[in-house]
Image (cartoon, rainbow, N blue to C red):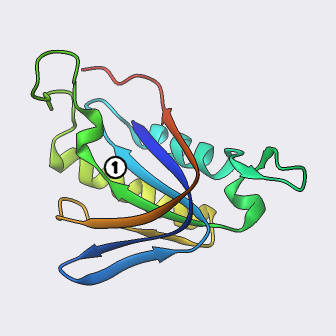
Amino acid sequence: MLTVIQRVSHANVVVNNVVLGEIQQGIVALIGIEKGDTEAQAQQLVDKMLAYRIFADDNDKMNLSLRDINGGLLLIPQFTLAANTQKGTRPSFASSAPPDIAKPLFECVVQYAKQNHHTVTCGEFAADMNVTLCNNGPVTFTLKTKNAKV
Protein backbone atom coordinates (compact mmCIF):
# COMPACT_ATOMS: atom_id res chain seq x y z
CA MET A 1 0.00 0.00 0.00
CA LEU A 2 1.31 3.41 -0.85
CA THR A 3 0.29 7.01 -0.52
CA VAL A 4 1.36 10.40 -1.71
CA ILE A 5 0.76 12.93 1.05
CA GLN A 6 0.67 16.65 0.47
CA ARG A 7 0.74 19.33 3.13
CA VAL A 8 -2.10 21.70 2.26
CA SER A 9 -3.57 24.97 3.47
CA HIS A 10 -6.97 23.81 2.13
CA ALA A 11 -8.44 21.14 -0.15
CA ASN A 12 -11.67 19.59 -1.33
CA VAL A 13 -12.99 16.75 -3.45
CA VAL A 14 -16.01 17.06 -5.73
CA VAL A 15 -18.05 14.35 -7.49
CA ASN A 16 -20.88 15.28 -9.85
CA ASN A 17 -20.73 18.91 -8.69
CA VAL A 18 -21.19 17.87 -5.04
CA VAL A 19 -18.46 18.55 -2.48
CA LEU A 20 -17.87 15.22 -0.73
CA GLY A 21 -15.08 16.37 1.52
CA GLU A 22 -13.27 19.53 2.47
CA ILE A 23 -10.45 20.40 4.87
CA GLN A 24 -8.49 23.45 5.85
CA GLN A 25 -4.86 23.05 6.97
CA GLY A 26 -3.81 19.42 6.87
CA ILE A 27 -2.93 16.55 4.57
CA VAL A 28 -4.34 15.28 1.30
CA ALA A 29 -3.48 11.61 0.93
CA LEU A 30 -3.75 9.84 -2.41
CA ILE A 31 -4.09 6.13 -1.54
CA GLY A 32 -2.88 3.37 -3.88
CA ILE A 33 -3.75 -0.23 -3.06
CA GLU A 34 -1.71 -3.08 -4.51
CA LYS A 35 -2.32 -6.80 -4.79
CA GLY A 36 -1.43 -8.49 -1.53
CA ASP A 37 -2.09 -5.44 0.68
CA THR A 38 -3.74 -6.08 4.04
CA GLU A 39 -5.80 -4.33 6.71
CA ALA A 40 -2.72 -4.30 8.94
CA GLN A 41 -0.86 -2.34 6.25
CA ALA A 42 -3.82 0.04 5.95
CA GLN A 43 -3.67 0.74 9.68
CA GLN A 44 0.12 1.10 9.58
CA LEU A 45 -0.18 3.65 6.77
CA VAL A 46 -2.78 5.70 8.66
CA ASP A 47 -0.70 5.65 11.83
CA LYS A 48 2.30 6.93 9.89
CA MET A 49 0.30 9.68 8.15
CA LEU A 50 -1.11 10.94 11.44
CA ALA A 51 2.31 10.97 13.12
CA TYR A 52 4.48 12.13 10.18
CA ARG A 53 6.15 15.41 11.12
CA ILE A 54 5.71 17.68 8.10
CA PHE A 55 4.35 20.85 9.70
CA ALA A 56 6.53 23.70 10.90
CA ASP A 57 7.12 24.39 14.57
CA ASP A 58 7.87 27.84 16.06
CA ASN A 59 11.44 27.57 14.71
CA ASP A 60 10.20 26.84 11.17
CA LYS A 61 11.42 23.21 11.38
CA MET A 62 9.26 20.27 10.24
CA ASN A 63 8.66 18.90 13.73
CA LEU A 64 4.88 18.81 14.05
CA SER A 65 2.46 16.09 12.94
CA LEU A 66 -1.12 16.32 11.72
CA ARG A 67 -2.21 15.43 15.25
CA ASP A 68 -0.02 18.18 16.73
CA ILE A 69 -1.64 20.89 14.59
CA ASN A 70 -5.17 19.43 14.80
CA GLY A 71 -5.32 19.44 11.01
CA GLY A 72 -7.67 17.77 8.58
CA LEU A 73 -7.08 14.60 6.58
CA LEU A 74 -8.58 14.20 3.11
CA LEU A 75 -8.26 10.63 1.79
CA ILE A 76 -8.51 10.04 -1.95
CA PRO A 77 -8.56 6.53 -3.48
CA GLN A 78 -6.21 6.51 -6.48
CA PHE A 79 -5.53 3.17 -8.16
CA THR A 80 -3.13 4.78 -10.66
CA LEU A 81 -0.50 5.12 -7.91
CA ALA A 82 0.12 1.38 -8.10
CA ALA A 83 0.88 1.52 -11.83
CA ASN A 84 4.12 0.12 -13.19
CA THR A 85 5.65 2.90 -15.29
CA GLN A 86 9.11 1.42 -15.83
CA LYS A 87 8.53 0.06 -19.31
CA GLY A 88 7.16 1.75 -22.42
CA THR A 89 4.87 4.76 -22.59
CA ARG A 90 1.67 3.24 -21.25
CA PRO A 91 1.26 2.36 -17.57
CA SER A 92 0.49 -1.19 -16.51
CA PHE A 93 -2.01 -1.67 -13.71
CA ALA A 94 -1.20 -5.36 -13.17
CA SER A 95 0.04 -4.69 -9.62
CA SER A 96 -3.07 -2.72 -8.61
CA ALA A 97 -5.54 -4.58 -6.43
CA PRO A 98 -8.84 -5.34 -8.21
CA PRO A 99 -11.81 -3.20 -7.10
CA ASP A 100 -13.44 -5.98 -5.04
CA ILE A 101 -10.30 -6.10 -2.88
CA ALA A 102 -9.23 -2.46 -3.06
CA LYS A 103 -12.58 -0.93 -2.07
CA PRO A 104 -12.84 -2.70 1.32
CA LEU A 105 -9.19 -1.84 2.03
CA PHE A 106 -9.78 1.83 1.22
CA GLU A 107 -12.85 1.74 3.49
CA CYS A 108 -10.62 0.23 6.18
CA VAL A 109 -8.21 3.16 5.78
CA VAL A 110 -11.10 5.63 6.13
CA GLN A 111 -12.68 3.95 9.16
CA TYR A 112 -9.37 3.48 10.97
CA ALA A 113 -8.44 7.12 10.30
CA LYS A 114 -11.83 8.29 11.63
CA GLN A 115 -11.34 6.19 14.78
CA ASN A 116 -7.93 7.76 15.38
CA HIS A 117 -8.31 11.37 14.24
CA HIS A 118 -11.00 14.01 14.62
CA THR A 119 -11.17 15.54 11.12
CA VAL A 120 -11.20 12.95 8.34
CA THR A 121 -13.05 13.12 5.06
CA CYS A 122 -12.69 11.25 1.79
CA GLY A 123 -13.38 10.91 -1.87
CA GLU A 124 -15.51 8.21 -3.46
CA PHE A 125 -14.03 4.91 -4.57
CA ALA A 126 -14.08 4.44 -8.39
CA ALA A 127 -15.68 7.84 -8.99
CA ASP A 128 -14.48 10.51 -11.37
CA MET A 129 -13.33 13.05 -8.79
CA ASN A 130 -12.09 16.60 -8.97
CA VAL A 131 -9.57 17.27 -6.21
CA THR A 132 -8.63 20.88 -5.56
CA LEU A 133 -5.82 21.71 -3.17
CA CYS A 134 -3.31 24.33 -2.23
CA ASN A 135 -0.05 22.47 -1.59
CA ASN A 136 1.65 24.40 1.18
CA GLY A 137 5.42 24.59 0.73
CA PRO A 138 5.12 22.71 -1.56
CA VAL A 139 5.59 19.71 0.69
CA THR A 140 4.92 16.26 -0.79
CA PHE A 141 6.07 12.80 0.35
CA THR A 142 5.53 9.22 -0.75
CA LEU A 143 4.88 6.69 2.01
CA LYS A 144 4.79 2.96 1.42
CA THR A 145 4.08 0.02 3.66
CA LYS A 146 5.91 -3.28 3.26
CA ASN A 147 6.03 -4.29 -0.41
CA ALA A 148 3.01 -6.25 -1.54
CA LYS A 149 3.46 -9.72 -2.97
CA VAL A 150 2.20 -9.91 -6.55
**In screen coordinates, is 144 left or right of 89?**
right
Which residue sits at x=31%, y=40%? 33
* Direction from residue 127 to residue 60 in the image, left or right: right
Residue 92: x %, y % from top left? 13, 27
User: Residue 78's spot in the image, x, y percent?
Assistant: 28, 49
Relative vertical location of residue 126 with respect to residue 122 in this rendering, above or below: above
Q: Say which quadrant the C terminus sits in.
A: top left
Q: Residue at x 40, y 22 (%)?
A: 147
Rendered location of residue 53, percent (x, y): 72, 45
Q: Quadrant of the N terminus?
A: top left
Label 1 sits on what residue type?
Leu
**Residue located at (23% from left, 41% from top):** 80
The residue indicated by pointer 1 is 105
Label 1, residues with CA under 10 Å away: few <14, some 14-19, many ≥20: many
Q: Position of residue 77 (x, y in %)?
A: 31, 54
Residue nearer the viewer, 104 or 136: 136
